[in-house]
Structure formats: structure tokens, C-alpha cells
Image (cartoon, grey):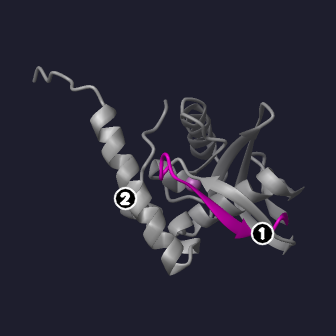
Amino acid sequence: MAYEIRTYGDPVLKTPAQAVTDIDGKVARLVDDMFETLFTSDSGIGLAAPQVGVQKQVFVWEINDEPMVIINPEIVESSGEWLYDEGCLSIPGLYVEMLRPNEVLMRGRTLDGNEIEIEANELMGRLFQHEIDHLHGVLMFDRMTPEQRKEALTEYRKILDEQAKAKPRRLRLK
Ligand code: NI
């Protein structure tokens, strides 16, 4: 079943996630439900467990029709720099150009419990850094300079206002 995606302001997004000690059926179900949530989202390519309210170090992603999951991930090496218009399902509608390392080496575990290392750059490298930030309770706003943050928050409030206006009114029967 798809989860509701938590958005900026929800304290769960500011709380560091716990490492997974037992990769059991519960984790497998969580991953299934996270994929369903990601696939039914507007434009997401990655989703971290805290974004669905679960404090576990798990994230899923899909680039080029290849659904992938990693458990207890960490960035073990990074290099270079890349500017990219970053977005987040928990801050819907906002895109901010951010500078981060370009190439990263991520280490973690697969759903089978095997250790895995993945090297990535550009979009996938950015996704890994962004999702691992979520597992540490870090959001895009926390990566911005104070001036950038002020501007981004103002823009995000405008986006929220517009979204609220665009939402059709529903008649409540109970
Ligand atoms: Ni995000």
C-alpha cells in the first residue's frame, strides 16, 4: 500500500533514522510499499524511509526503469563538484540549484543482506547524497547558505499558497 509522503515541517524529517539490524519480512514489505509510493508520486526518482514516517536507514530509487533499494547506506568516497537543480518529494514544487560533489561511492546492503558498493555521478550521484541526507534528518534547506534558504523558503511558501488555491473543494459528508 502506498504511504502518504511527509512534507517539510513534519518532525520525522528532522530525526536521524536507525540502522536496520535485521533485514526481515517487515523490511521487505516496507520496501514494496516505498516503491508503490514512489511510483505513484508526481515526479520522484528517489524516496527515503523517513519521508514515509519510518525511521529506518532505507531508500529506494528508480532511474532508467530500474527499481533499486539500499539498506544502511553511506557515502565512503566523493569527489568533484556538480551544480544541479535539486528537488524533493517532501518539499513539492521547489527546485534549487545546489553544488555538491559529483562522483560518489556508496556502500550499503541489498535486501538479501549482501554488502554492495555503487559508484555514481551526476543525477544518480546526486540522488544518493540527497537520500542519505534524509536518513540523517537533513533537508535541502539545511544545505543552503542563509541567503539561499531565505529565498527558497519564500518561494516554497508561494508554491504552497498556489497549491492550496488550486485544490478543488471537497464536500465532506461526515
Ligand atoms: Ni528528498
Residue 17 visible (yes or no): no
Q: State the mark number for residue 75.
A: 1
Residue 151 location (% of width, % of height):
46, 67
Instruction: Give the alpha-carbon distance from disc 2 to disc 1, as whole Å.
Output: 26 Å
Residue with the mark numbered 2:
10
127 within the magenta span: no
- As drawn, is 5 to the left or to the right of 61? left
Amino acid bearing label 1: Ile
Label 1 sits on a secondary structure element that is: strand
Question: What range is drawn magenta here?
Answer: 90-103
Amino acid bearing label 2: Asp
Residue 79 location (% of width, % of height):
87, 73
Residue 10 visible (yes or no): yes
Residue at the image point whose x is 60% and y is 31% from the top: 39
Label 2 sits on a secondary structure element that is: loop
Q: Along the line of sight, which residue is nearer the eye, 140 or 5?
A: 140
Asked whether mark 1 lies closer than 8 Å to ligand 1, one says: no
Q: How many numbered marks have been drawn onto this rendered protein structure?
A: 2
Compare marks 2 and 1 and give the one earlier in the sequence: 2
Q: Along the line of sight, which residue is nearer the eye, 102 or 11?
A: 102
In what quadrant of the picture does the C terminus appear? top left
Residue at the image point whose x is 81% and y is 34% from the top: 64
Q: Along the line of sight, which residue is nearer the eye, 174 or 26?
A: 174
Q: Which quadrant of the figure has residue 105?
A: bottom right
Residue 118 location (% of width, % of height):
87, 56
Determine the quadrant in which ligand 1 lies: bottom right
